[in-house]
Amino acid sequence: NKPSITPHTPTTTSRVLSECDIQTSIYDNDPEMRSVKENFDRQASQRFEEYEERMSEQRQKCKEQCEKDIQQIILKDKVQKSLEEKVEKGCLMCACGLGGGVAPVWGLVSGLWYGTWSPYVATTVAKAATDAGVKETIKGLGQIYGLSTLPGVDIPGMVNAGNFQNIMHLIKSVMRVQNNFCTSGLNETNLFCSTEVKMTSPVFTQGVTQSIRETVEVAGRAAKMAEVAEAAEFLPKTTILTNTIIAFIVAIVVIVLVMLIIYLILRYR
């Protein structure tokens, strides 16, 4: 006798979803859809990487610019403090000689002279540095794609002592000029407007931004050089005035001593 095998065939179809069925897409076995998904994932990943690279470069540029601005501010403060200390030492020596010597009134005069001379020197030096920086910024803006050749544009009116190193303000000013002055006629004849038309807007804006950054750096160096030169011109003047006051004090002391000697001779004669 052969053993009989009873088949266990289910009489009903189960509609229960297994974990595998839930997580499996109906397109997983479709080669075309799988290729589309892979292509999309690859392009999305590439774009994210490019975006991250651009943002990283931008952050690095901003960081470098901030460090440069901080160094310029620190250097400017050092020069101003050094000049003020030199003037202060010379004037305090005069004040001490006058105030502690024969005529205290001259100590007051020396102190008043210092009180007016020191701010005057600092203000004059700062103004010379600012004027040089503004002049260099105006020159640099005029060279951006031939901006100075654009009819009606007032470049000096765009720059002043408060914004000649403000990169964002200068960028907005140049782009505002492009929006307001570049008409259909100038787009064909003017260098600045035609350059904007030939380039795409992002490329044009990037070029303007880079040019303004370079202009601001040059203006900062020009302001620094003018500040040092102006300060160097004041140092000899300060020395001459100090020596003049000291000589005058010595003359007064000598006169008083001579008068005192004459008085003593006449008194005990």
Image (tube, grey):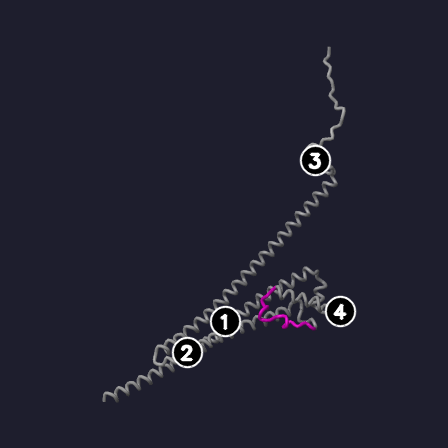
* 229 left or right of 207 in image: left
Q: Element at badge 3?
A: helix
Q: Element at badge 4?
A: loop
Q: Earlier in the sequence, mark 1 or mark 2?
A: 2
Image quadrant assignment for residue 191: bottom right
Distance from Cα at disc 1 to Cα at disc 4: 47 Å
Distance from Cα at disc 1 to Cα at disc 2: 26 Å
Q: Which residue is mark 3?
A: 22
Residue at (71% x, 43% y) in the render: 37
Q: Which residue is mark 1?
A: 228
State yes or no: residue 156 in magenta: yes
Q: Which residue is mark 4?
A: 185
Q: Which residue is mark 2?
A: 110
- Image depth: mark 3 or mark 4 in front: 3
Q: Earlier in the sequence, mark 3 or mark 4?
A: 3
Most foreground residue, 119 or 39: 119
Is residue 56 depicted above or below 269 in this figure? Answer: above
Could you say which disc has been placed on residue 121 in the image? none
Q: Which residues are magenta?
A: 152-167
Q: Element at badge 2?
A: helix
Q: How many marks?
A: 4
Q: Element at badge 1?
A: helix
